Amino acid sequence: LLCSSAASSTLTHGDADAPAAQGDGVVDVNPPRGTRDFPPEDMRLRTWLFDQFREVSRLMTFEEVDFPVLESEALFIRKAGEEITQQLYNFEDKGGRRVVLRPELTPSLARLVIKQGKSVSLPLKWFTIGQCWRYERMTRGRRREHYQWNMDIFGMPKVRAEAELLQAIVLLFERLGITSKDVGIRVSSRKVLQAVLNMYSVPEHLFAEVCVIVDKLGKLSRDEIERELISTGLSSEAVQGIIEVLSLKSLSKLEEVLGSDDDAVADLKKLFSFAEQYGYADWICFDASVVRGLAYYTGIVFEAFDREGKLRAICGGGRYDKLLSTFGSEDTPACGFGFGDAVIVELLKEKGLLPDMSRQIDDIVFPLDEALEGPASNIASSLRKKGRAVDLVEDKRLKWVFKHAERINASRLILVGSSEWERGMVRVKILSTREEFEVKAGELE
Ligand SMILES: Nc1ccc(Br)nc1
């Protein structure tokens, strides 16, 4: 096939199709601000991490789904003042449609569940790994994209769903070599805040907005939080009541305040009892201040944190039983989490747990002279068909080939030389033991 498009021409200064060159005529080779390239070594690390995400999803029998990075803006219009909706990477497309680069994955998951309608049997357990975007003024120099692993369960109303999701998170951490001494998972329920707001007869429509403000506890000063809460119309008694209850760190204290028959207390006691049975009780702790920053959570919420307190939340999630009705559909109980690709890598670096990401291949096939390029092709091809990863090298000096073999951690070097080839043989060098021997070309495997 001939390369026909102008895009196949090399980018040179003055080329009509070349993007506007900068000053000295060279296109900016950096990716757009706030975004990352993944050259091979970085891509091997990312692939390794995503493989761990996928393996845990398999163990939990979640099915993989995917959807476009581009979504209708309507899916993310929420009025609770979340940072995520104030930083939408939104624009109007050439058809005049309001679209976004999705900032999170849960609304897309919900959209797909609604679209699948009665054709899916509940409960359903889906996972996805996808790039998410935000448009933040670069003043803070933060990234504008990251990849998130999301696990969501639809149609499981009881805290079994939360217990399953927490096991998935702990399985992932353990696979990476992280222990409960390195990381904890704070668990609470938005029903705690709901109970407090009810005590002060705070109208239902303020719930999401109050949650978003309270989520900033620990990031903003207490005065700032109080000011923002008062600005929603809450009385100062309600504000003090909220801050008092949300500072509770013990479930028994919470039970004293809310009573044993309170929904939040019952849910949390059940979840902590499950945790003992699953074997991850030492990973989780009750912390009433956890509310998470997304407006749509309605029940249990949780977030993983590094116990040294150096990093931002590693992952987080919770129950969102009323999201589907905000899209005009019938509500289905739902629960899920998002696990980003950035903080976890920072944690692995901190703990010296980054895996060895160097290349590894099986064979290098090298014809010792040009006349043997054909046989070398045949040998490489048959080895590849037998499942060997083969690098076919030519036009190089032997000294370079040995260096290359070391650089890419080849297991074997297969030299195709004329004297051996005349006898139907090739020379094999096992690079780990330096062992060297001849093999019949047809018997190589
Ligand atoms: N929601 C969101 C999207 C992209 C990044 Br980076 N962080 C958060």
Image (tube, rainbow, N blue to C red):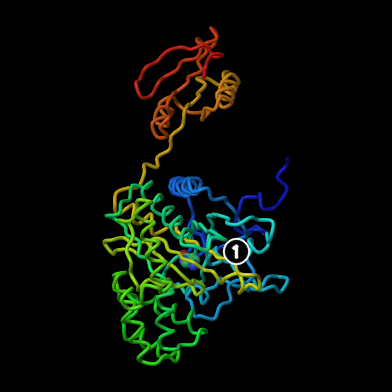
Which of the pair 225/425 is nearer the observer? 225
Residue 219 in picture, x, y percent from top left: 34, 75
For disc 1, the marked residue is 108
Residue at image position (32%, 52%) is 349
Q: Residue at x 73, y 71 (%)?
A: 95
Amino acid type at circle 1 is Ser
The one nearer the camera, 204 or 229, is 204
Question: Eyeballing the image, is 266 above or below 193?
Answer: above
Question: In the image, is residue 40 above or below residue 133?
Answer: above
> Would residue 394 be visible to someone looking at this image?
no
User: Can I make out residue 392 in this image?
Assistant: yes
Left or right position of 420 against 332: left
Task: For mark 1, give the secondary structure.
Answer: helix
The residue closer to the viewer here, 213 or 355, is 213
Mark 1: is the Cβ under 8 angstroms from ligand 1? no
* Percent position of residue 55, x then y: 48, 45
Which residue is located at x 45 percent, y 55 percent? 164
Label 1 CA crowd tier, 10 Å (few <14, some 14–19, many 20+): some
Image coordinates for residue 134, horizontal then vertical, percent:
51, 69
Q: Residue at x 46, y 15 (%)?
A: 427
Residue placed furthest toward the top: 423
Q: Is residue 8 left or right of residue 354?
A: right
Vertical side of 371 occupied by 339: above or below? below
The part of the image, by quadrant, that contains residue 307 is bottom left
